[in-house]
Image: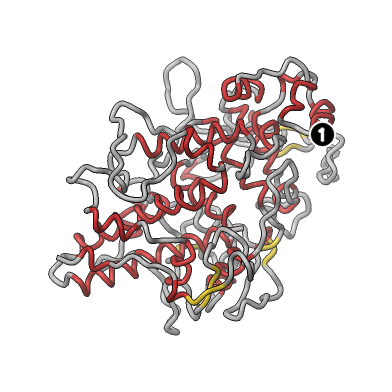
Amino acid sequence: MLIMQFAQFLDHDITLTPLNQGFAESIPSCRPCDSKQTVHPECNPFEIPPDDDFFPQFNSTTGEQACFPSMRTLQGQSDLGSREQVNQNTPYLDGSVIYGENNCVLQMVKGENGRLNASDLGDGSKDYLPRTTTNSECRSASGLCFYGGDGRASEQAGLTMMHTIFLREHNRINDALQVLNPSWSADKRFNETRRIVVAILQHITYNEFLPRILGDDQLDDFGLRLLSDGFYEDYDPTCSPDTLTEFAAAAYRIGHSLLRARVPMLDNNFTNVDPPLLLRDSFFQTDRLFAPNIIDDIARGISSTPMEDLDRFVTNEVTDHLFENTQIPFTGVDLVALNVQRARDHGIPPYNDYRDFCLGDRADTFDDLSDTTDADAIQQLQQVYQSVDDIDLFPGGLTEAQLPGGLVGPTFGCIIGIQFGRLRQCDRFWYETADPVVGFTEEQLAEIRKITFSKLICDNIDGNNNIHAIAFNIPSDSSNPRVPCDSLPAPDLSAWQE
């Protein structure tokens, strides 16, 4: 499950598609079918069909047609022309999910003495994310939700865990650098720590995460294979790292298929903590998470539990109960339906266009999909779409067979590969850069290359002495045994000592 959770954390680093809002940044209710006329002109609700297996087609009180709420994405221009959407985050893989996409957010998360702001339980445990009462989406009984560099840090418990691990890593490295270089100012220490943490995020992404998503062949095809030594020389100052809307609104939403209904938790002895946290009970509800050991239990649980298969099946926790008010039936929304609606809002062409672009193999009939898609999926697509050219990109991509050694099919693999290729090649501050002004020394780079996510967990949860050596694979006595944390390689920060 760590693959799913890391994927969401990465997504929040490189893309945030802001929606239109009401007065004082309020969130209008676009659930009524006439809300475009009565609530907000950018409301874009869509009707619940008669054959939905959970949501009723008609309001049981009024008898009127029922709709799913949907707000259109904020448009990026006021002049005439094709509507373009805004990416509110920096497209670079630059740790903005930790440090914020602009200086205002940075100053909010930045603490004293080079550290990030944190909450202290007062029991000697490691840092927790700070909390605030200003999150408009917060559903906690206390009114308090966590905040971090990205405003979605409280969206669900696994994501909160990821934010917490990287918060703790920053503060851990900062404290170590203070010992090594006591003459450094707090600002210098903060900025150097930030540089190291961003490098760790980039290294884990390309060294551990992407090979499992794409498989080995795609790493070479899109220039994603990291160097084992030396510097990266292929920076292109003319290319654009902008987040592709096909990536953000469709191809990289693959994690929705990997979700499990419950957030697993394991204690320090790797024994199940019962009851597990139901996903619908953790959407912007953080009170339970502000307790000793629970973040640590979630880290052990998510890294030790198999995820769901990447296919066209998605847990009903997010197709029936996403952001549900548990006191009122049928107040959730369908995440997959929203994905399709969002892609249409962005004007994304149909799946067949991307199949043609990526594979050079446009389908003329549904039967032509058989080289990538099984017969049962093709039959279901025919029941939904009149023409093969009508298939939306998100459901079309999810039906494809996986690439060798990867999780996604060839069309999503192509879009994801292009995006992450750009994120490396277009980034002047890429951690492997040979630029001596912004890059690391060869000695420092060699230390960063030692980091693994398993070591990151070991260093940043309480009471843990053992962990499986490869965090993105499930534990196995034969192929991925649990080993002492001290046996895992770790960067030697003395490479930063002046």
Residue 231 drawn at (x, y percent): 28, 45
Q: Residue furthest front?
A: 478
**Is residue 442 visible in the rendered structure shown here?**
yes
User: Is 30 or 382 nearer to us in this picture?
Assistant: 382
User: Quadrant where the N terminus lies?
Assistant: bottom right
Q: Tell me what residue is drawn at x 61 percent, y 35 percent.
A: 39
Q: Residue furthest bottom?
A: 123
Say how many tags the image has.
1
Q: How is the image coloured?
A: secondary structure
Q: Is residue 311 above or below residue 376?
A: below
User: Is 91 or 59 nearer to us in this picture?
Assistant: 91
Q: Is residue 228 left or right of residue 157?
A: left
Q: Is residue 297 left or right of residue 330?
A: left
Q: Is residue 453 left or right of residue 278?
A: left
Query: Regarding mark 1 in the picture, which secondary structure is present there?
Result: loop
Residue 255 drawn at (x, y percent): 61, 47
Q: Tell me what residue is drawn at x 77 percent, y 27 percent.
A: 370
Q: Tell me what residue is drawn at x 18 percent, y 67 percent.
A: 497
Q: Is residue 215 above or below residue 460?
A: above
User: Is 83 or 458 nearer to us in this picture?
Assistant: 458
**Is residue 35 visible in the rendered structure shown here?**
no
Residue 148 drawn at (x, y percent): 42, 58
Tell me the kind of residue under disc 1: Pro
User: Is 99 or 25 nearer to us in this picture?
Assistant: 99
Residue 112 drawn at (x, y percent): 26, 68
Label 1, residues with CA under 10 Å away: few <14, some 14-19, many ≥20: some
User: Quadrant where the C terminus lies?
Assistant: bottom left
Judging by the rendered image, the residue that carries numbered circle 1 is 49
Q: Is residue 184 left or right of residue 26?
A: left
Residue 359: which quarter of the image?
A: top right
